[in-house]
Image (cartoon, rainbow, N blue to C red):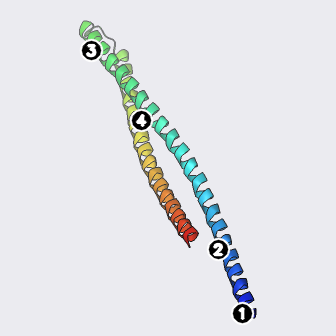
Amino acid sequence: MDALKESIQAKNEEIAQLNAKAAEQQKVFDRQKDINEVLMEKNAALRQSLERAKQSKEVLKARLKNMVTWGKGVEQQHKRSQPPASGESWRELQERIRQREEQLQLLQVRHVEEIGQLQRRLKQREDTLRRVLAEKAQFRQV
């Protein structure tokens, strides 16, 4: 009879330990889920930012093309009568546009790298969640 009571007590303690472990794993799962949601939101924001940067780059390219076309026409019409100041300002404008395009390319590269990094983190989080859920499923089967 005492052996039976001791066995029941041992099983109750084991159940309590398993319940505590399950609660801890649930907390980890919930925390990972929250982190996953935050990363997904950040990923979406970065994608939008990247898209805006791409659109801005395209607008700048179109403006540059229009300016170059316009500039060539003006140069052909007023080749000899064009004052040196406008040519200098034209070169300055071209330089600024080139610099902006380089900045946009750097931003694009940085955004792509950050998206890749976020995707890797997200995959790690998903793997961790899957592992925790698999362990939890195994625990419930026992």
Residue under label 4, please give it: 104
Question: Which residue does the image show at 45% across and 51% down from the upper left?
Answer: 119
Identify the secondary structure beneath mark 2. helix
Relative placement, left or right, of 45 versus 100 is right
Q: Residue furthest front?
A: 1
* Amino acid type, callout 2: Leu
Q: Earlier in the sequence, mark 2 or mark 4?
A: 2
Instruction: Look at the numbered discs 2 and 3 and tell me whether their residues touch, using CB distance below 8 Å.
Output: no
Instruction: Look at the numbered discs 3 and 1 and tell me whether their residues touch, using CB distance below 8 Å.
Output: no
Residue under label 1, please give it: 3
Residue under label 2, please give it: 18
Task: Pick the quarter of the image with the C terminus.
Answer: bottom right
* Amino acid type, callout 3: Lys
Residue under label 3, please give it: 72
In the image, which is nearer the foreground, mark 1 or mark 4?
Answer: 1
Can the viewer see residue 91 in this picture? no
Q: Residues within 10 Å of mark 3 (few under 14, many from 20)?
A: few
